[in-house]
Amino acid sequence: MIARAAANGLKVGIRGIGASVPSRIVSNSEIAELVETSDEWIVERTGIRERRVAEPGVGASELAVPAARDALRAAQVDASSLDLVIVATITPDMPFPATAAFLADELGAGKVAAYDLQAGCTGFVYALSQAYGSIAAGLAKRVLVVGVDLLTKYLDWHDRGTCVLFGDGAGAAVVETVGEGGFLGFELGNDGSHADDLCVPAGGTRAPATTATVDQKLHTMRMNGREVFKFATRVMVTSAERVLGIAGMQPEDVDLYAPHQANKRIIDHAVRQLGIPSERVILNVDRYGNTSAASIPICLAESLRNGMLRPGTTLLMTGVGTGLSWGSALMVWGDAVSGSHDGARG
Ligand code: ACO
């Protein structure tokens, strides 16, 4: 799925952004007490030094609330003015109803339309495209897009192939028409023939929870790390090239690149292939690990705070994740946007 945005002159962009992560920091050395690994191995193979881990009892909507409130505050709008809340998550509060239902209620958004979107680490980019489409079609004027995941809740803390990689976090964006800038294009895709390479096998309708599924740890993440790595390195590049192509741009036109933060080696490879200078690339995987759908909005909130993201910045975002899915969004950052990232809640 690929489309040039703003072709009809409609400028839709991000008005405000917010992010939130749990206060508890778990270092690589702490994980090395649970499984046979080391800080050296994790840093060399992934670039990750530490991650945030939510306390027991904290669910996705609870972590998303402060991020969403920050985004609304930054956009200077009230939750009651929203038409739609989209929550991108693979770690919902419950199998149903949607986490978006709990979040919208907690925010005081009233009887707003609210649903969840499941595209793993690509979720935020998918949700931005849905928000853009809803506004472009006249279905909504103002949309809250949230990316939140607490994958530490789905980890087998005895599987060193996965437990070193993930952290918890939330990010949010208010999407609406803007005076300057806005989205230039989207490119989204999915290859379901690799769906089993990254999954939680039980807890759905194929294998509802039983004592046997619990005993066999089928409610925790299974990942074919090598296959996901190969896939990610390939599609990060092709997706970014496609979205730039539809907008008539080259990698050198990108002022700031916000790649999904899964693994520094994947990002380094994509950046090298695309030819984007490293000073234009956001990198925070060392501090948060892979926060899945939250990774890109956390990058944006931090970049606004440190001045890397400014009005007029041409911003490229690329996500890749379970599905196996991928997606890129290209935009020019508008002039009436701000953001905040309080860094320690939940
Ligand atoms: N510590 C020490 N050794 C380890 C660890 C660890 N944490 N994990 C694996 N190893 C060992 C393996 O057992 C293997 O040992 P062997 O050679 O004796 O069999 C060796 O290290 C090499 O294993 P590889 O899997 O080849 O290691 P690789 O360099 O590929 O790194 C990693 C593994 C980090 C998982 C990498 O494959 C990767 O990052 N894959 C992508 C994962 C990813 O990004 N997933 C998220 C997608 S997004 C979403 O939607 C949630």
Image (spheres, rainbow, N blue to C red):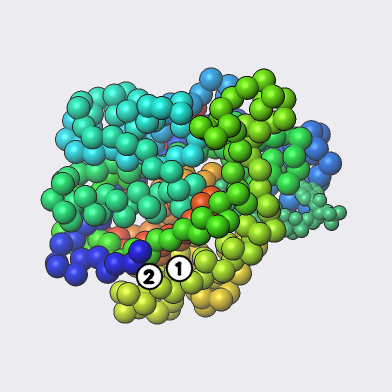
Q: Is 278 rendered above or below residue 342? A: below
Return the x and y of residue 55 as percentages of the image width and height. 57, 24
Q: Secondary structure at mark 2?
A: helix
Evaluate whether residue 99 shows in this view. yes
Q: Quadrant of the rendered structure where residue 187 is? A: bottom left
Q: Is 243 rendered above or below residue 345? A: below
Disc number for residue 239:
1
Q: Amino acid at mark 1?
A: Ser
Dot 2 crowding, Cα within 10 Å, few <14, some 14–19, many 20+: many
Dot 1 crowding, Cα within 10 Å, few <14, some 14–19, many 20+: many
- Residue matched to label 2: 243
Return the x and y of residue 237 as percentages of the image width and height. 51, 70
Evaluate if marks 1 and 2 touch, with contact meaning CB atoms under 8 Å apart: yes
Q: Quadrant of the rendered structure where residue 221 is? A: top right
Q: Residue at x 46, y 28 (%)?
A: 95
Q: Residue at x 32, y 36 (%)?
A: 115
